[in-house]
Image (cartoon, helix red, strand yellow):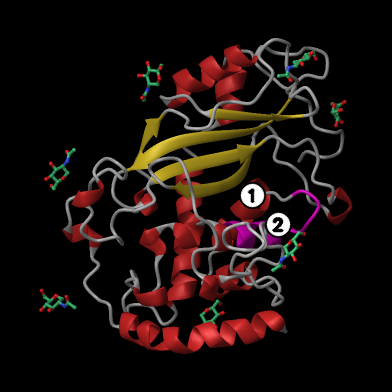
Amino acid sequence: MIYFKTNLLIILPIFTSIVKAWNSDNHTCALTKPIFSCENQTTILDTCCTPTEGLVLITQYWDTYTGLESEKSFLPLNSWTIHGLWPDRCDGSYGQYCDLSRQYDPFPSPNTTNGKIDGIPVPIWQGGDIITPLLQKYGKYDLLSYLEKYWKSQGSPDWTFWQHEFSKHATCFSTYDVGFEGVPNCYGSIYQNSTEASIIDFLESVIKAQIQYPTYEWLSDEGIKPSNQTGYNINKIQDILTKASGAQPYLGCYGPTKQILSEVWYYSHSLGRPQEGILKPINQTTKTNCNSTQPIWYYERTPGSEY
Ligand SMILES: *[C@@H]1O[C@H](CO)[C@@H](O)[C@H](O)[C@H]1NC(C)=O
Ligand SMILES: *[C@@H]1O[C@H](CO)[C@@H](O)[C@H](O)[C@H]1NC(C)=O
Ligand SMILES: *[C@@H]1O[C@H](CO)[C@@H](O)[C@H](O)[C@H]1NC(C)=O
Ligand SMILES: *[C@@H]1O[C@H](CO)[C@@H](O)[C@H](O)[C@H]1NC(C)=O
Ligand SMILES: *[C@@H]1O[C@H](CO)[C@@H](O)[C@H](O)[C@H]1NC(C)=O
Ligand SMILES: *[C@@H]1O[C@H](CO)[C@@H](O)[C@H](O)[C@H]1NC(C)=O
Ligand SMILES: *[C@@H]1O[C@H](CO)[C@@H](O)[C@H](O)[C@H]1NC(C)=O
């Protein structure tokens, strides 16, 4: 209720700019010469055509179970799963929940836009799953079944994770803007509902980027397969993925001695919109946190968790 009151105050003055932005035409990126994001910010003439927060991260998980196997949620055989597609600023810092008019995350984390106690609260979304019905409405059953297979949440329904990623990250990519607070509406008036257009556009972009980074295959081709018997040297894994992807990724490990491998983040610059999926590999800006003195675990999935 408190959220509703504060939002109402904020929304009223913004309303006029949304209306104005609705007529924000002329963002036909096909007519512009594409440039790489983060290589010269002053050359970005149309923020719909090149992301201003243009250090693009392709992020993945290695989980061993979903926690919802009893509800028939399994991990994909021989594949890492999708975490997201993130817009970092060129210096490696980042924003989150950049457009609260597109807040569909039932578990906002952090719960304020700057992650601090005095930040703007991110209202909790209580309207349930909007992505599944949206994809069904537009006949994108193929996309939906791909997401259901490869974009897995742990311990909560997959749609909660998709909506979290969209609201927390996609809203900070200028190329999916829909006219909030005076920014352009990149979708112009072609679509009845630009927000829906931006959601579908983002989901497709995530897939387009992710399929270029087959982590499981890259490791498996070099003999690194999940094992509960043999630990691996993190530098070996880092070298394989650096060679295969074209730049050094960040590898994430957890556990008290940081010996359980669970994440990879690949960094890139995008040629024009990330929607096109033309990504130039860039070295990590966050240093791998895995234990480099002792072998790390790349665990096998829990029996019955894979499909
Ligand atoms: C959009 O482009 C047309 C054709 O070049 C031009 O006449 C019009 O002024 C432009 N509108 C805006 C808002 O830039
Ligand atoms: C960036 O682009 C601007 C405008 O094209 C140009 O004047 C400037 O020299 C460029 N800067 C660098 C570092 O290339
Ligand atoms: C955010 O979470 C913190 C820590 O759990 C809590 O103290 C704070 O009240 C929460 N803020 C909002 C706006 O929900
Ligand atoms: C546009 O779509 C979003 C997401 O489905 C929905 O929340 C919003 O109400 C729609 N806006 C309009 C004007 O129909
Ligand atoms: C790495 O693992 C060893 C042995 O498990 C442990 O003693 C050491 O503190 C770990 N290093 C880090 C940075 O966690
Ligand atoms: C990444 O860093 C390595 C070692 O510092 C360097 O040799 C390489 O050129 C860098 N790669 C890219 C894509 O910047
Ligand atoms: C491998 O070990 C992990 C971590 O203990 C466990 O979750 C998983 O079930 C194990 N897998 C197999 C096939 O034993």
- Earlier-in-chain disc, 1 versus 2: 1
Amino acid type for the residue under numbered disc 1: Trp
- Pointer 1 local density, CA inside 10 Å: few below 14, some 14–19, many at least 20: many
Disc 1 Cβ-to-ligand 4 distance below 8 Å: no
Q: Quadrant of the C terminus?
A: top right
Any magenta on residue 164? yes
Q: Quadrant of residue 304?
A: top right
Q: Quadrant of the N terminus?
A: bottom right
Q: Which residue is mark 1?
A: 151
Q: Viewed as shown, does residue 187 lie left or right of 215?
A: left
Q: For marks 1 and 2, give the CA distance.
A: 7 Å
Q: Secondary structure at mark 1?
A: loop
Q: Position of residue 144 (x, y in %)?
A: 60, 59
Q: Which residue is mark 2?
A: 158
Instruction: Kindly identify the residue that appears in the image at 63 percent across and 69 percent down.
Output: 121
Residue at the farthest front position: 118
Residues drawn in magenta: 154-165
Amino acid type for the residue under numbered disc 2: Asp
Viewer-closest of 9 and 135: 9
Q: Secondary structure at mark 2?
A: helix
Q: Viewed as shown, does residue 184 lie left or right of 209?
A: left
Q: Would you say the residues marked 1 and 2 are in contact, meaning their CB atoms lie under 8 Å apart?
A: yes
Viewer-closest of 204 and 142: 204
